[in-house]
Image (spheres, grey):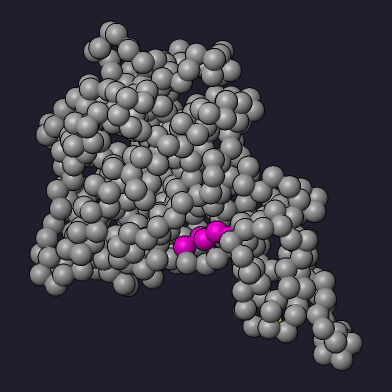
Amino acid sequence: SLLREMRESLKEGIIPVGIFNDRELYELEMEKIFTKKWIYVGHESEIPSAGDYVLRYIGEDPFIVNRDESGEIRVMLDACVHRGVRVCRAEKGNASHFRCPYHGFIYKNNGNLIGMPAQQHAYNGLNKKDWGLLAARCDTIHGLIFACLDKETPPLEEYLADSKYYLDLLFGLQDEGLEVIGEPQRWIVNANWKVAAENFSGDAYHLIFLHHSAYEVGSSPFSMLANMNGEQILAGNGHCVDISLDKTEQVIEMPYWNFPQEIVDTFRLDRLEPKGLEIVRDSKEMLGNIFPNSSFLLMTVTPERDLPPVPFISMRQWRPKGPDQIEIWNWFLMFKNTPQEFKEASYRAGSATFSLAGIFEMDDSMTWETITQTAGNRFAKNHLKLNFQMGMNGMGKAKRDEEWPLPGIAYYPRYGEGNQRYFYESYVNTMLDDEE
Ligand code: FES
Ligand code: FE
């Protein structure tokens, strides 16, 4: 099969293009990956009060993510247990109960079925306790809500493995935590979800060419080539982190991602060990992918000519909508304890670059779509093998960074495709059920 071929060829850094647009594989991904792994669905700050809810997706299934009367966060399948009708009628809101529009079953916002019309005539004797909304497991890290549909999957913290260190580093900088600015944006791109996840896992290489024009118009304050120096980290369970961190350049013109000093003063830098502090002070961008399809990005960009460079933080879910389509969900987050004008400036910076109308985003989408088209065409599907060999067997500059003192296995500089190979190794092993 395609998967067995892939597992063999991946040892040589080669992947058959067919995996990027295949209906059968897609169905198996839903089964083996999306109903088993932890998936990011939103942030606590989107549902601050009891009863607040938002509608989110895990794979193809819609879920109500809410805060019940007792303040607990819940993730529940948006489907009535009577006939499967969707009970949540809006994208977000506040509700003490969800009432099914078909026959009127009523669920409390903790998912318990509490009644139905003409109960004594129609459903007397039903044990309502057995018939609540189906619940997913959920847990949070720095307010980021993750959900999982499998009871056997290890707890979130264990699942995150070495990526947890880097999530703590970035999202734990301020005691007050983070909040989502505005609404998460969402839009459709005709691309396979793996292409996007792979890109955020560590494709620094495409910055040089695809995003050259974005650099040319001055959207990044940093030199593009210096930005290629940095660590690409295999962070356990298929998670990847990619940090630009220049070992050679002595002068860091814009420390702390150009956060204003008064904001840097609120950061708990005292909690960081030397190397962690160095990342926060000296790195120019930081991104990664939590396997399978949750990505994060911190970058400092100039939103418009003559405006100063501002850092923004984006969380993403590459929501699969078929073998050749994703809905991109894009949340802009910022530390709570920052001035309102700063939050707005950060939102503008993110919108100008990484959003539906963002100049980086449009570059990326165009290429991701054609990969997916290629993968769906008959000749390419059967014959095209893709090269992922950068950083292997002396090809490319990336070498194992033996001195890396933080969690994960690191490679330096960013001229490598080790992160992508790692993502696909985890992918193919998960799909073939191999845990070795
Ligand atoms: Fe929901 Fe019948 S389908 S009450
Ligand atoms: Fe890009």
Secondary structure that dominates the magenta span: strand
Q: Is residue 401 visible?
A: no
Residue 50 belongs to magenta span: no
Above or below, comparing residue 196 to residue 272 in the picture: below
Image-quadrant location for residue 187: bottom left
User: Which residue lies at the image location 54% right of the left edge and 44% below the top edge?
Assistant: 182
Q: Position of residue 209 (x, y in %)?
A: 15, 38
Q: Nearer the viewer, residue 379 or 347?
A: 347
User: Outermost residue, front direction?
Assistant: 306
Above or below, comparing residue 429 to residue 48 in the picture: below
Q: Position of residue 85 (x, y in %)?
A: 62, 78
User: The N terminus is located in which quarter?
Assistant: bottom left
Q: Position of residue 266 (x, y in %)?
A: 58, 18
User: Which residue lies at the image location 38% right of the left edge and 70% below the top edge?
Assistant: 27
Q: Position of residue 3 (x, y in %)?
A: 27, 62
Image-quadrant location for residue 381: bottom left
Find the magenta span and give its range.
55-59
Q: Nearer the viewer, residue 395 or 294?
A: 294
User: Outermost residue, bottom direction?
Assistant: 121
Residue 57 belongs to magenta span: yes
Q: Is residue 278 visible?
A: yes
* Residue 247 in the figure: left or right of residue 32: left
